Image (cartoon, coloured by chain):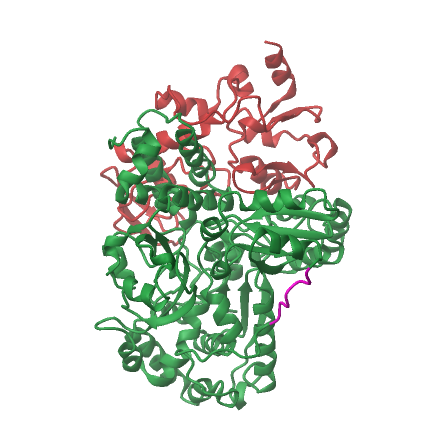
Amino acid sequence: MKLLTKMMHLQEQHGVVTDSMLRDLSKSEGVPLHRLEGLRGFYPVFRRTPGSKTHVQVCRDIVCLMKGGPQFCRKVKSALTGKPGVEIEEVSCVGRCDTAPAATINEVPVTGSVENIVAYATGKKPLPAHVPTTTPRRWPTDPYTNDKEHYGVLKKFLKPGDDRQRDEVIKILKAADLRGLGGAAFPTGMKWEFTRQAPGTPKYVICNADESEPGTFKDRVILEELPHLLIEAMILGGWMIGAEEGIVYIRHEYAKEKQALQAAIEKARGAGALGKKIFGSEVDFDLQIFVSPGGYIMGEETALLEALEDKRGEPRNKPPFPTNHGLWGKPTLMNNVETFSAIPIILDRGASWWAAQGKGNYKGLKYMCVSGDVAKPGVYCVPWGTTVDELLTLCGGIPEAKGLHAFSPGGASTNFLPASKRQTALDFKAMQEAGSSLGTGAMVFMAEGRDVLELAISEVKFFRNESCGKCVPCRVGSHKAVDLVEAALAGKPAPRLVHLLEDLNATLAQTSICGLGQVAMAPLMSVISYFPDDVLPKLEGSGRRK
Amino acid sequence: MADDNRKLINLTIDGKPVQVPEGTSIWDAARRLGIDIPVLCHSPRMRPVGVCRMCVVDIGQRTMAASCVRPCEEGMKVEASSAKVDQHRKMLTSLLLSDYPEYSAREMSTSNDQLLALAKKYAIQDIPFADGATGMPRGTDMSSPVIAVDHQACILCDKCIRGCDELQHNDVITRTGKGYTARIAFDLNNPMGESTCVACGECMAVCPTGALTNKSVFAEMQVR
């Protein structure tokens, strides 16, 4: 954290991290030059040469592609050509898919038409305020009706007889069947138990607030509107495993959300919920925020750990897993924002209350990020087991009375499904049985007339762009996969293209180190399987499969 | 290894039983049985990193395991030489070859280019991927008096980096960039000859391809 923090500070102060700055840093910190170069070259926040006064970043990923069209960035570029002091860059998803097409100007999120973005960039229009909301909404996973009640669950559990209380918490989390809501669906109770049992000190609690997968922005809303739940769960996590230090790893693009979280942390300290002898108990725990120097791959838990250790954020080979061998090789409890923030209400009201919030046999509540062709995009907290169709209705249906053609239920890594699967329940297992997965809960609706191949390729390009480059299948394979499809679309398909893509996908899925490489081609393969009539004529220049 | 107190683990590799101390990698266990698992990024002298993925084996799980980094587990049934495993190794070789330069200085001088050896082993002829080497877009670095750097032949196996930073403690080489544009770099991405490199030669000794070779050999090759 130390080196990257220093480097980010230099970047912020000077707009650049030059060789001479790194030579000085190398001397003062006693680290070799190559290590600093490895970091500067890897993280997108660092620049070798100073940039322009105004830095416009335009999102190129699926939802912005749908809303702005494939030429959106080019149009912004040409409208800004010749404007002094402005530079434009195409970037990966900035987590504002609900207001697509999204861009940022000097890190302030903006949205709207090309003209609108140009007006902001040239100073004709003042940039919108980028500060946390002062009127957070009431969300059904918040057990508290006002600030004074905050940390009530923590008070209840931090009592003498701790070990029995700890056993009780594990029991409740298991009974509630809470799973990793960052997409991996690992049972949370088990993770807490493993980390509690793991030998070694010190231990750490980390919140993965680096959601960056196209279509995903639910944690953004939780961080801004419910930060006290996240903080409370992390303190409980610290108490559970015996950690005194917690870190929230937040994506670079979430500046106002970081501000909201920081304010909540300070408030918690003031209230005695963080710091030494929490609420008069023997428990010490404090939290710090680490802002990511950028890159989707840091959402992969071991890449995140590498970044915290001041290394290039390249995923580790697993096993060992972070529960036993996490930050600095020590046991580390790491959960996603949504997972942590569900815990206070589960402990407050009990596992059976949580279960009863779901529909039928499904348990609990789920935050869904809804975007694409839908009347009211945004974050919705719905009963687990709500169907895709019900979610679509809740979000106002598809505009212009169009029909649903396809949907991607869980982020860029999940298979597209046809509209015929719209009765599928929002649930890890149900979605898997339907041929996809719930992933991060990033639901992108695609109306009739959408080119699913174009959209699926944009997802593969996202993974190619965000590949860390550590292992061969992902680094080279994701690049070649995009090449193959682009050649086909240019009228030059490779022989036996679909077979070749299937073989390449198998190698990426089977041999890549981490989830990014394993799923890089999944959306493409899913449109080949589920939308052959749409896709095969474009890929092979004929309607016949294989 | 025999005098330590580690627990002994029993497993089978390609149906052959083997007993190894806990913590032994599958790759090392296979060597005891005389099973040679192909690898580009590993050598017994080095800390394994599992990046080339050529050593993947089937252990009956959701994904394959890189045998150089995966410790043996009790009761494991490892398929190290099945058709499925070979299919992936062949694909990985093809991917690397698609960006490989037409000539490898290592192959032309000492005939021990390990990527080209795999190409032969798997009888790879037609590579179905776009040629990434045309015009050698990644370039060369001839600034060192001793060592020739051909970035186009670099497969980012990390061996030179470990050789330089961990075996010799010269601390010069890193990876810079990210994804497909990642490459090896010296100090602050300086030309090798202007870096703190002392030309010890470890990097070219451990390099499995034509990326780091003796400069005189490379020059001769360019003439041909």
Residue A252 visible in this rendered orientation of the protein: no
Nearer-the-camera pick, A99 or A366: A99
Q: Position of residue A30 (x, y in %)?
A: 71, 52
- Which colour denotes chain B? red
Q: Which residues are magenta?
A: A125-131
Question: Left or right of B111: which side holds A456?
Answer: left
Quadrant into which the N terminus of chain B falls: top left
Nearer-the-camera pick, A97 or B207: A97
Q: Residue furthest top?
A: B224
Quadrant into which the C terminus of chain B falls: top right
Answer above or below: position of B11 versus A244: above
Looking at the image, which residue is at 72% across and 49% down?
A17
Answer above or below: position of A391 versus B145: below
Q: Position of residue A115 (x, y in %)?
A: 61, 52
Is B19 colored magenta in this rendering?
no
Looking at the image, which residue is at 24% across and 31% down?
A544
**Chain letter for the green colouring in the rendering:** A
